[in-house]
Image (cartoon, rainbow, N blue to C red):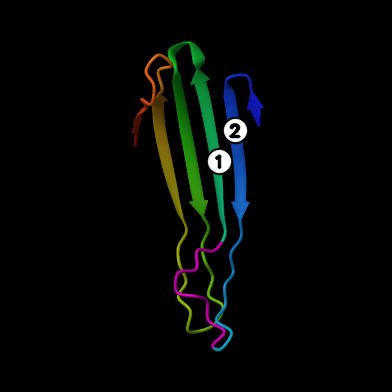
Amino acid sequence: MTKEAFDARLTYSSSNSENKQTGQALRYEVGDSMSLSLGYQLVDYDLSFNWTSLITFDLKPNTDQDTAKEGYNVHNISARWMPMNVENLTVTAGI
């Protein structure tokens, strides 16, 4: 969704892998996750600001041999400056 200088995006991803021979989840199974991204542009100053939150939900085992994984939440904050009068210059700072 974009409204003037503001934009937002909400996503959801579902993952449920299984080894066909053993029935176990694959080693690097992520599980379900959701992310929210919010951004704002200051066009007069060639600046944009972004915040993203990624939530990965707890992963329940498919079989007794699978390992349960706790969910986690990651936040990213960044600012980007792309001056229109300097070709191919982008400065990004983030945490």
Element type where label 2 sits in the image = strand
Residue 67: where, in percent of width, then height? Answer: 45, 75
Residue type, mark 1 in image: Leu
Q: Quadrant of residue 28?
A: bottom left
Mark 1 highlights which residue? 36
The image shows residue 55, relative to residue 84, as above or below, that is below
Q: Amino acid at mark 2?
A: Ala
Residue beneath disc 2: 8
Q: Residue at x 57, y 50 (%)?
A: 34
- Give the residue at x 54% y 70%: 60
Residue 74 inside the magenta-drawn segment: no
What main secondary structure does the magenta stretch of the protein show?
A: loop
Q: In the displayed structure, would residue 94 be above or below residue 85?
A: below
Q: Nearer the viewer, residue 75 or 43?
A: 43
Label 1–label 2 contact, CB within 8 A: yes
Magenta segment includes 26: yes
Give the x, y percent position of residue 23: 57, 84
User: What segment carries the magenta color?
Assistant: 22-31
Residue 79 position, x and y percent, is: 40, 27
